[in-house]
Structures are given as structure tokens and as C-alpha cells.
Amino acid sequence: GATNNYGAVFLGGNVGIGTTTPNSILSLYQASADVGISLGNSNATMWTMGVDISDGSKFKIASSSALGTNDRLTIDTSGNVGIGTTTPTSLLQVSGATPKFYLSNTSGAVNGKHWFLSNATGDFSIGTTSDSLSGNTTFLTVKGSTGNVGIGTTGPISELDISGGTGDGDAYNSVLSLTRISSTGNRLAGKIV
């Protein structure tokens, strides 16, 4: 049977707080109120995770002593995950003043380990950054205000603006090459610009 000690119930090795029928190693329940666990060494450095009943029973992790204050991660009852937002509208939504996502390969080349996706001032960018994550090289930009796409430029002035290439005459690096493979496997390319 269940043993009730100091508001906790012990049943078959499971512990229940707020319930007499714990269904896992630790079950926490509280009627019509937030249920969470707080961790930290003072109120200034607290983290709390749990269910925020006052916000649609969303699971949250907050950098505070209470859910609903400084929420850093939210999972709603539909399974949508929000980082920087408590109202995610898709499977993953990242929100912030200048949201940036890094994809890092720790065994990559020097200053080539980190690719980024960024939304700065409404412009979407893809590029790489230095090992210290301090210097960016942007390869592709989509302007939020116009939809113009820039390759090699962060300020495209037409629907597709490709910038790059060096040299003059026959010995130049083209900005754009159109390539096809022949039936014999040879690469056939034509330079443009």
C-alpha cells in the first residue's frame, strides 16, 4: 500500500507529491496551479521548469524562480516548441531581436566550422563565421523588404543579384557558369560575365 509521509506518498518505489497514485518515479500534481521544480543557489540565479497552468498548461523552462517570468523554452500542448517566445505557432519557432542559428562541425576547417542562418533587420542570411563566432562571411541574402536574392552581396538590387569573380580578358573567374555533363561524362561549362 501507499505510505504518506509529510505530504509525499511512496507507492511501489514511486514518489507522489500532491497525488496518492504516483505513476512514475516522481509525480508532482497541484490542482489549478503551476507545478514546477526550481533549481539554483539564490533567487538571483534560479531556474524553474514545469507546467504553467495559467498559460494553457504549457511546459516551460524559465530563468527565474517562477514560471511565466523570463521563460526561455516553451512547449505547448500541440507539441510546438518556442525558444524566446511563449506562443510558438510551428514545430520550432526561435524569436529574438536578431535570431541566429549555428550549425557547427567541431572537426571542420579553421574558421569554417560554423554555418549560420540569421534574420537580421528582416533579411534572411546564410553564411559562415569564424571559430570565435565573431566574424561573419555571408554567402546568400534574401531581402525581407523586396524578396531580392543576393549571392556574394548582402544588398541585392534586383530579383537575383550575383556578385563576385575576378580578373580581366580570357583569364577571369566567372560570376556564373552554366554546366552540363556530356554523354561521355565530360563537363561542359559556359561562363557568363
Image: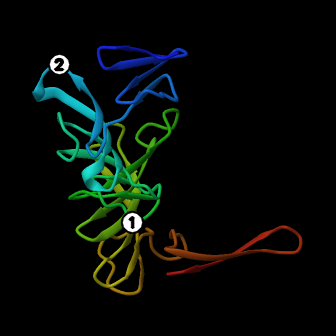
Q: Residues within 10 Å of mark 2 (few under 14, many from 20)?
A: few
The image position of residue 126, as x and y in percent, is 41, 61
* Up-down relation of residue 62 to residue 171 (above or below): above
Give the color scheme: rainbow, by chain, secondary structure or one colour: rainbow
Which amino acid does the dot numbered 1 rest on? Answer: Thr
For the point 10% across and 28% down, the residue is 44
The outermost residue toward the right is: 184
Cα–Cα span, label 2 and label 1: 34 Å
The image position of residue 1, as x and y in percent, is 53, 15
For the point 37% across and 87% down, the residue is 158
* Up-down relation of residue 148 to residue 93 (above or below): below
Q: Nearest the camera: 135 or 188?
A: 135
Which amino acid does the dot numbered 2 rest on? Answer: Asn
Q: Quadrant of residue 86?
A: bottom left
Label 2, on which residue? 41
Label 1, on which residue? 89
The outermost residue toward the front is: 1
The image position of residue 13, as x and y in percent, is 52, 14
Element on which disc 2 rests:
loop
Q: Nearest the camera: 78 or 128?
A: 78
Element on which disc 1 rests:
loop
For the point 29% across and 14% down, the residue is 6
The answer to whether residue 190 is left or right of residue 94 is right
